[in-house]
Image: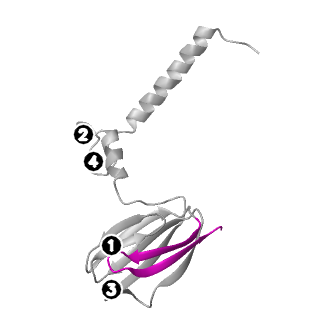
Amino acid sequence: MRSRPHGTERLGRLLVSGLVTIAIAACGGAVDGDGDDGVGATTSVTDRLTTTSTAAPTTTTEAVRVIEVGIVGGRPEGGPRREQVDLGGTVRLVVHSDVADEVHVHTYDLRVDVPAGGTAEIEFVADIPGVIEVELEERHTAILTLEIRPG
C-alpha cells in the first residue's frame, strides 16, 4: 500500500471540498420552467428555502392521519366521537364549523381559532399517550376524544 505525503492528502481534501461547494452553488439557479437561467435573479437559495419552509406543513416520509370534524349549530355532527391514534403518529385535525370558536386540544395545549363558516387545522405528533379531549373552548363543548396508544 502506498501512502501519500500529508500535504498532498490535505490538498486533495480541499479540492474535493471546493468541488462540492461549487456543485451546491451551481444548483442554486432557477429551475421553475420559465426560461430564466437564474442570472440576475433577486432571490438567493437561502431566500427560496425560507419561503418554501413557511408553507403549510406536509409530511412525505410518514403518513398523516387526517381526522375531520363538522360543527353544526355549535355541536359536532353525529355527536363527539372517539378516534384511536398510534403513539408517535402525525395527526391533522380539520374542523369545519358554522360557528366561530377556538378549537383546543387538551394535554398538548394546542389552540386555533375557527371562523364561522370556516375551517381550522391543527397538526401535531401524537407523542403523549392517553385519552385526550378536543373541544370548542368558548362553548365548553367536546367535539372529539383522541385515544393515543402504542402502535
Say if residue 29 shows up in the picture: no
Q: Which range of residues does the magenta coloring cover?
A: 129-151
What amino acid type should be assigned to the residue bearing mark 1?
Answer: Glu
Q: Earlier in the sequence, mark 1 or mark 3?
A: 3
Dot 1 lies on which element?
Answer: strand
Q: Return the mark for residue 72.
A: none
**What residue do we see at 51% from left, 19% from top?**
14
As measured in the structure, the alpha-carbon distance from the residue carrying label 1 to the one carrying label 4 is 46 Å
Mark seen at residue 41: 2
Q: Position of residue 77 (x, y in %)?
A: 40, 89
Mark positioned earlier in the residue sequence (1 or 4) = 4
Secondary structure of the residue carrying tag 4 is loop
For the residues labelled 2 and 1, the Cα–Cα distance comes to 42 Å
Residue 113 location, quadrant: bottom left
Q: Splitting the image into 4 quarters, where does residue 131 fall?
A: bottom right
Quarter of the picture containing the C terminus is: bottom right
Residue at which label 4 appears: 35
Label at residue 74? 3
Neighbor class of circle 3 (other Cα within 10 Å; few <14, some 14-19, many 20+) is: some
